[in-house]
Amino acid sequence: MAMKVINNSAIYLGSSILNKALPFLLLPVLTKYLTPEEFGVLAIFQLMISFFTAFIGMNMPMNVSKNFFKYSKDQLSLMIGNILIILCFTLSIYSLTIGIVSFYYENLFSVPINWIIIIPFISFMLMMNSMNLTILRNEEKALLYGFFEVSNTAINMAVTLVLLLLYNWGWHASAVGIITAYAVFSLISMLYMNKNNYINFTYKKTEIKKVLKLSVPLIPHVIGGVIIGLSDRFFIENMISLEMVGIYSVGYTFGMVVILFTDAFIKAWSPWFYSMLANPTLKKKQSIVKFSYLYIIATFAIALGISYLAEYILPYVVDDRYYGASEFIFWVAIGYAVHGVYKIFFPYLVHINKTAFLGLSTIIAATLNLILNYILINEYGAIGAAYATLFSFLVSAILVFWYQNKNYKMPWLKSKI
């Protein structure tokens, strides 16, 4: 089983590298054809998608991961069908809300309101795709997962290039690329899930309650995560300039490369982790602890390596207007290494149905992040935002580890490595 985790991690890593390599190939084009201000608007638009997805999606695919090895196929299809019913309801609520807001504002955080109106639909399509990818991951169909993931990005990239180079659409080219890719793969996801009998649209109140019991407490957690990871751009826009948002976002993109490795491991780890704890023994727990230690060590080594290499790669990838992005890379990379440590403890709280604490811990860290962003940006400039992100991720990881260790004992100091 452990070897399967390693093999699947390698496949996920390969697809993730390819998936992220495509946007990096696009980066020289974007930084050449978009001013830092336009790049900043695009960054804010992408942040808003993440923000609305937290409310509309409520991390509901987590229900699939948690119950995939516990439920029968019929139970799973009923649960997924009711999740889709909830998604349709939340889509309607937030679309109506944004429609009302559009009568009073022309722009929100530099993004035109007519683009913000369609964000709930983008979030809905993103969740459809995420649901399907979660199923593929738990089916251990790593190759098909990678194909879907890479194809999504390839469509996004192709549409962006056509609209940017041939029609000079500016940041709108990338926005349309995002919408097109999500639309295509939300349809493909629906067809795949339906063909494989994963959808039963029979409304069942008890299933709705089960899903919401796990997912609603995750709303503060997801929102807090969005605040920690993304609010820095809003502070920089208002305290410094939209141009600096664009430069900072480029540096952030390099630092976030750490996610390639942490996400690849967690994607393979989660199905194995939940299956091991479905019938836990001391030997299984020791195996989990051993791989957790190795993962943590590797994550920080990778972050340091990325920080070193990025300094040399940056001038060959971006336009000279964005060279200032180099000062942010190290701190963002270390921050996401710490966040990677947090991810290894996150599943324990899902396993023991203690997701409410995830919300509490993340809100504490997010509140601290907002305070630190204001203080540190005011004191040190844009680099203060990277400091704030790192410290907030650290607080979140410490809190979740403490709570996991208190409520679900693991042999952290007793396992032979």
Image: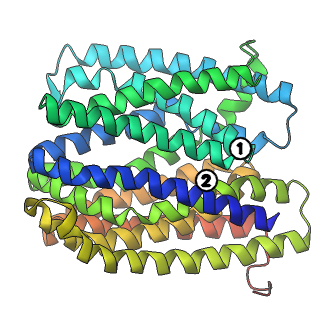
Position in image of residue 52 (x %, y %):
40, 33
**x 13%, y 68%: residue:** 324
Q: Amino acid at mark 1?
A: Ser
Quarter of the image where the N terminus is located: bottom right
Q: Nearer the viewer, residue 99 or 29?
A: 29
Q: Amino acid at mark 2?
A: Phe
Q: Is residue 77 left or right of residue 262?
A: right
**x 83%, y 58%: residue:** 277
Is residue 408 shown to the viewer in this render?
no
Q: Which secondary structure lies at badge 2?
A: helix
Position in image of residue 159 (x %, y %):
30, 31
Q: Which residue is mark 1?
A: 65
Q: Nearer the viewer, residue 65 or 3?
A: 3
State which tag comes first along the sequence, 2 or 1.
Answer: 1
**x 11%, y 54%: residue:** 239
* Label 1 crowd bin: few (<14), some (14–19), many (20+), radius 10 Å: many
Q: Nearer the viewer, residue 2 or 400?
A: 2
Which of the 4 image quadrants contains residue 380? bottom left
Q: Which secondary structure lies at badge 1?
A: helix
Q: How many marks?
A: 2
* Above or below: residue 414 compared with residue 67: below
Position in image of residue 412 (x %, y %):
74, 79
Q: Nearer the viewer, mark 2 or mark 1?
A: 1
* Label 2 crowd bin: few (<14), some (14–19), many (20+), radius 10 Å: some
* Mark 2–mark 1 distance (CA, rounded to whole Å): 19 Å
Q: Which residue is mark 2?
A: 357
Q: Is residue 191 left or right of residue 372?
A: right
Position in image of residue 368 (x %, y %):
36, 61
**x 67%, y 73%: residue:** 292
Quarter of the image where the C terminus is located: bottom right
State yes or no: discs 2 and 1 in contact (Cβ < 8 Å): no
Which of the 4 image quadrants contains residue 2? bottom right
